[in-house]
Image: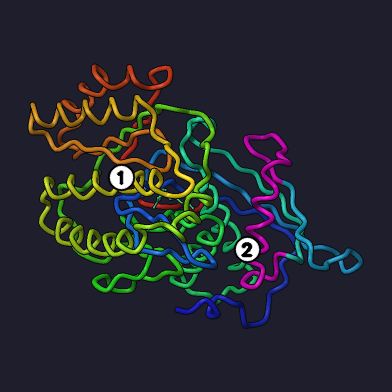
């Protein structure tokens, strides 16, 4: 599909008022998206595990403006986060609405009230933009579905992911599916730069219910935002090689998903995490998001893997927190290790237990 296919065509039903609610999860990338072109087009394809417990619940109440009320070109909305009115979150949402206006012009006809809450602590350093933007995009699509009842389920989810991408790139991977690919890749059928697709190929049973224990090393605000980081890839001396490498790693991961070879999985996933941070450390200006405890944890994971042979590995987001990934069948031993050896490096010993989830859900 092309971007213009998401511009609504047919006549509208008249819907006066209503409320919709969606829950949408966060996701953790295995092959990372870092670097983008105009209109939130990724510079390379990425793939992620959808999470289960880290999620946002968002409701959208909409009331059609009366003919006497000004429709104009301004979005009219209130935003509440965990019950509190939040003016400081509004500019981000306003920008999102502006970006999707062409595809959802009907939003201008409504007064909107958005209520959002996260299942994970707000100040956990866990990015809530993926779950938050995807939940909001899904709510917008539920309104669109009422206005255009004939849209298909396939169109609904593709457009939800398309809209979510315009809010926050990685959010497009939080809409549908356990493993999601975003960005065109020669070996992955249906892959698109415009939206995430449910990984279409065979996945070995060892990845069923894969575990992700998120170690909260640093709960502070990020010093450098992802948008700034993405932009630094434009003049980055290693960017072209990096983008090629992501294509290659995704192709290799496709074979690994089929074979279930966890040694190869670990090699790709850890290398991707460190490459992401290496790109940050070698951009201009350079920056470091890892903390000393991030490195302590990585070293402890390597030592534990060496000593036990258990297939536990780490990945990182654009932050200091560590995602510890391992098969469900090794849960007991790995969790014991995490408790004994890793929690001491976390802020107030905090962590989040998560695993692969199914994607978003209408409530
Ligand atoms: O979605 P954004 O623009 O916040 O970028 C997120 C990028 C990473 O989380 C670092 C990697 C990824 O693919 O999710």
Q: Is mark 1 within 8 Å of ligand 1?
A: no
The answer to whether 174 appears left or right of 354 in the picture is right
Q: Where 93 falls versus 321 (above or below)?
A: below
- Please give left or right for residue 30 compared with residue 312 in the image: right
Q: Residue at x 74, y 47 (%)?
A: 78
Which residue is outermost to the bottom?
10
Judging by the rendered image, the residue that carries numbered circle 1 is: 273
Give how far apart the Cα atoms at labels 1 and 2 are.
38 Å
Q: Is residue 304 above or below residue 203?
A: above
User: Is residue 233 something one can see in this rendering?
Assistant: yes
User: In this view of the protein, which residue sits in the foreground, 196 or 358?
Assistant: 196
Which quadrant of the rendered structure holds the N terminus? bottom left
Marks 1 and 2: which is nearer the front? 1
Q: Residues within 10 Å of mark 2 (few under 14, many from 20)?
A: many
Residue 148 image point, x, y percent: 61, 74
Residue 103 shown in magenta: yes
Q: Which mark is residue 143?
A: 2
**In the figure, residue 16 lies in which quadrant?**
bottom right
Identity of the residue drawn at 54% across and 44% down: 57
Comes first in the chain, label 1 or label 2: 2
Task: Please tell me whether residue 187 belongs to the stretch shown in magenta.
Answer: no
Q: Position of residue 174 (x, y in %)?
A: 43, 53
Q: Position of residue 235 (x, y in %)?
A: 45, 60
Crowding at dot 1, Cα within 10 Å, few <14 / some 14-19 / many 20+, comes out as: many
- Which segment did they paint magenta? 79-107
Q: Is residue 273 left or right of residue 167?
A: left
């Amino acid at each position: 599909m092309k971007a213009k296919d998401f511009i609504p065509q047919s006549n509208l039903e008249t819907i006066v008022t209503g409320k919709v609610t969606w829950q949408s999860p966060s996701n953790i990338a295995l092959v990372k998206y870092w670097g983008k072109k105009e209109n939130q087009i990724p510079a390379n394809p990425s793939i992620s595990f959808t999470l289960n417990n880290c999620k946002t619940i968002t409701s959208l109440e909409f009331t059609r403006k009366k003919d006497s009320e000004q429709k104009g070109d301004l979005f009219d909305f209130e935003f509440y986060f965990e019950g509190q009115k939040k003016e400081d979150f509004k500019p981000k949402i306003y920008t999102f609405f502006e970006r999707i206006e062409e595809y959802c012009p009907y939003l201008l006809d409504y007064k909107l009230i958005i209520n959002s809450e996260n299942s994970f602590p707000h100040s956990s350093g866990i990015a809530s933009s993926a779950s938050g933007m995807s939940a909001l995009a899904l709510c917008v699509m539920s309104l669109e579905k009422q206005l255009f009842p004939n849209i298909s389920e396939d169109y609904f989810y593709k457009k939800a992911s398309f809209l979510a991408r315009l809010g926050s790139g990685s959010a497009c991977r939080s809409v549908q599916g356990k493993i999601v690919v975003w960005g065109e890749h020669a070996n992955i059928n249906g892959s698109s730069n415009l939206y995430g697709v449910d990984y279409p190929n065979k996945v070995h049973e060892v990845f069923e219910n894969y575990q992700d224990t998120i170690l909260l090393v640093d709960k502070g605000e990020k010093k450098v935002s992802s948008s700034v980081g993405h932009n630094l890839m434009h003049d980055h001396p290693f960017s072209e090689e990096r983008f090629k490498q992501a294509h290659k790693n995704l192709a290799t991961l496709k074979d690994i998903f089929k074979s279930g070879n966890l040694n190869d999985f670990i090699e790709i996933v850890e290398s991707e995490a460190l490459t992401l941070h290496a790109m940050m450390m070698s951009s201009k200006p350079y920056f470091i998001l890892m903390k000393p405890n991030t490195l302590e944890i990585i070293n402890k994971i390597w030592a534990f893997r060496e000593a036990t042979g258990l297939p536990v590995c780490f990945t990182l987001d654009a932050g200091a927190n560590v995602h510890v990934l391992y098969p469900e069948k090794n849960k007991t031993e790995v969790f014991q290790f995490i408790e004994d050896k890793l929690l001491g490096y976390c802020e107030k010993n905090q962590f989040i237990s998560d695993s692969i989830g199914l994607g978003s859900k209408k409530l």
